[in-house]
Image: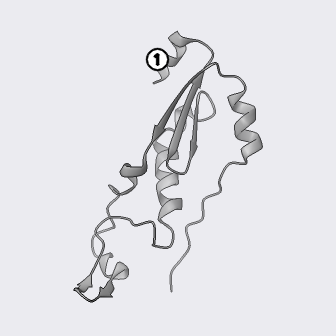
Amino acid sequence: MSVDNTYPLLLMKDMLNHLSKGKVFTKLDLREAYYCNQIREGDEWKTAFNCPLGSFQFKVMSFGLQGPPAVFMQLINEVLHEHLYQGVLVYLDAILIFSKTLEEHVKLV
């Protein structure tokens, strides 16, 4: 039995409301960072799968597993907590940084 780690996604209308305040934007794609999250040592067996080449276990999170997208988004939101909704929005593996002026934007980035 597995326990789901659900993490709510922002509503698009709320995100657009925040973005309407910005004039300068930067988008960061964390697609590759997702695969840098290691599975807790000792839990690798939970990711085991068989194929014609043998039996394998993941050492990092995979999109095919249950729960990793929520875990990854929670991690990113914790790291960027002080900036969220104040120039930074996160949606799954994308970070959008927005500011009213270029000077503000350079500091935030």
Q: Residue 30, image x and y in percent?
A: 43, 46
Colouring mode (rainbow / by chain / secondary structure / one colour): one colour
Q: Secondary structure at mark 1?
A: helix
What residue lies at 56% left-to-right and 73% top-to-bottom? 4
Left or right of 60, for residue 87: right
- Determine the residue located farthest toward the front in the rendered image: 52
96 displayed left or right of 65: right
The correct choice, above or below, for 89 with respect to 4 in the image is: above
Q: Is residue 98 above or below residue 67?
A: above
Residue that appears at 53% across and 14% down: 104
Q: Amino acid at mark 1?
A: Lys
Label 1 Cα crowd, 10 Å radius (few <14 / some 14-19 / many 20+): few
* Count of picture labels: 1
Residue appearing at x 31%, y 62% in the figure: 38
Q: Going by the image, does 20 lie left or right of 97?
A: right
Residue 96 horizontal/vertical position (percent): 55, 35
Q: x and y percent of residue 44 in the render?
A: 30, 76
Q: To which quarter of the image does residue 55 belong?
A: bottom left
- Which residue is denoted by mark 1 in the rendering? 107
Looking at this view, name the residue that lies furthest to the left: 53
84 left or right of 51 in image: right
Of the 4 image quadrants, the one containing the C terminus is top left
Q: What residue lies at 37% left-to-right and 49% top-to-bottom?
A: 33
**Above or below 19: residue 90:** below
